[in-house]
Amino acid sequence: MLNRRNFLTAAVGVAATAGLAACAKEDGGPSDSSSGGSKAITLGFAQTGSESGWRTANTDSVKAAAPEAGINLKFSDAQGKPENQISAIRSYIAQGVDVIAFSPLVVKGWDAVLKEAKAKNIPVVLTDRSIETSDDSLYVTLVGSDFTDEGRRAAKILEKVLEKAGHKGKVKIAQLEGTTGAAPAIERAKGFKEVMDAEHKDDWEIVASQSGDFTRAGGKQVMQAFLQSNPDINVLYAHNDDMGLGAIQAIEAAGKKPGKDILIVTVDGVKDGFAAMAEGKINAIIECNPLLGPQLMEVVKKVKNGEKVDRWVKTKESDFMQDQAKAELPNRKY
Ligand code: AHR
């Protein structure tokens, strides 16, 4: 646990405003979402991009929660490029925001810019994704899911899916990985493999595994290639719903039935994923909750006030089998 008080009582450096790199998109400034008071906290938030339904819901949640919490939000969209996220963070440092939050596109490469934030006494909150760093003092806390556990839960629910389908014989798994080097891609693969190696070494095999970059188009394209190189795939584990939805198109185009010929487990639980599950095309979904905005604003306020926060504020999530999809679909909030 870090004591933020010392860190925060030092003067927040106010430097000249620097422009973002040409391709990063920033909202904020004159149309900031503050409640009007001059003492509102200013939060600089550097988003990954808009690669998936999950991400859109996450952005909406952050943008809605800031004004509700009386926080002045400066928002930027890195459009899938870590260098844009770094530029956005640098711009927030130069603008002297009170707190910086970001959802790191990949785990590596943040130490230099986070040291710059630390030098200006601007605390950093990670949201959604974690980083690998040689210096744990470079961020205060992570608000987000346990992706390794999501991977384990995906493997455990696959056991139920196989049983329900009456599957006999070898389980030949295709894995659609998320963005290469991103925490959810690394950890969802790790958790799944952990259970597979411990409990299913003899009967389960990952016969194909490649990144679909968390996008629908990526999922479709990679699944097309998988089906050509491994026509006997009988399970798909996709690291998010969007890639699973793209893969469903490829499976149908190959004349196979998603959810029957190829059993499908995905992660996220966005409405489109649930709709596909209600149609019988996805067999189970591991929920990953994107509605982090309110929790993030609470943490930002505590951090700014020098209050102690947990090093990892975990998100609560559930797992869903196909037979729950129809009843659950109207309740989905994202
Ligand atoms: O980091 C969370 C992941 O990022 C979601 O599972 C995926 O859909 C998103 O793009």
Image (cartoon, rainbow, N blue to C red):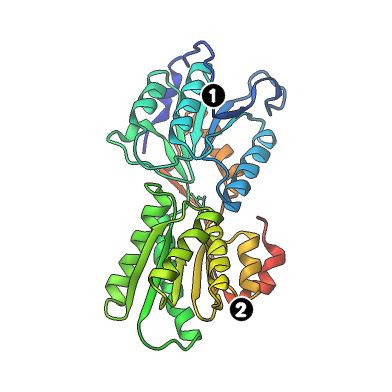
Residue 150 lies, in percent from the top left, at 44, 61
Image quadrant in which the N terminus is located: top left
Q: Is residue 192 visible?
A: yes
**Label 2 belongs to which residue?**
323
Whichever of callouts 1 and 2 sits on the residue coming sooner in the sequence is 1
Task: Tell me which residue sits at (53%, 53%) in the image.
Answer: 215
Residue 178, placed above or below residue 50: below
Residue 211: which quarter of the image? Answer: bottom left
Residue 308, placed above or below residue 175: above
Looking at numbered disc 2 in the image, what kind of residue is underneath it?
Asp
Determine crowd level at label 2: few under 14, some 14-19, many 20+ residues with C-alpha closer than 10 A: few
Residue 263 lies, in percent from the top left, at 49, 76
Task: Tell me which residue sits at (54%, 14%) in the image.
Answer: 17
Nearest the eye: 38 or 239: 239
The local secondary structure at tag 1 comes to loop
**Label 1 belongs to which residue?**
22
Label 2 within 8 A of ligand 1 by Cβ:
no
Labels 1 and 2 touching (C-beta < 8 A)? no
Task: Tell me which residue sits at (49%, 36%) in the image.
Answer: 102
Report the side of 231 relative to 71 (left or right). left
Residue 163, placed above or below residue 13: below
Q: Which mark is residue 110?
A: none
Residue 176 lies, in percent from the top left, at 44, 61
Residue 82 lies, in percent from the top left, at 44, 35
Determine crowd level at label 1: few under 14, some 14-19, many 20+ residues with C-alpha closer than 10 A: few
The local secondary structure at tag 2 comes to helix
Looking at numbered disc 1 in the image, what kind of residue is underneath it?
Ala
Image quadrant in which the C terminus is located: bottom right
Report the side of 11 relative to 26 (left or right). left
Task: Name the mark nearer the viewer: 1 or 2.
Answer: 1
Cα separation, mark 1 vs mark 2, equals 48 Å
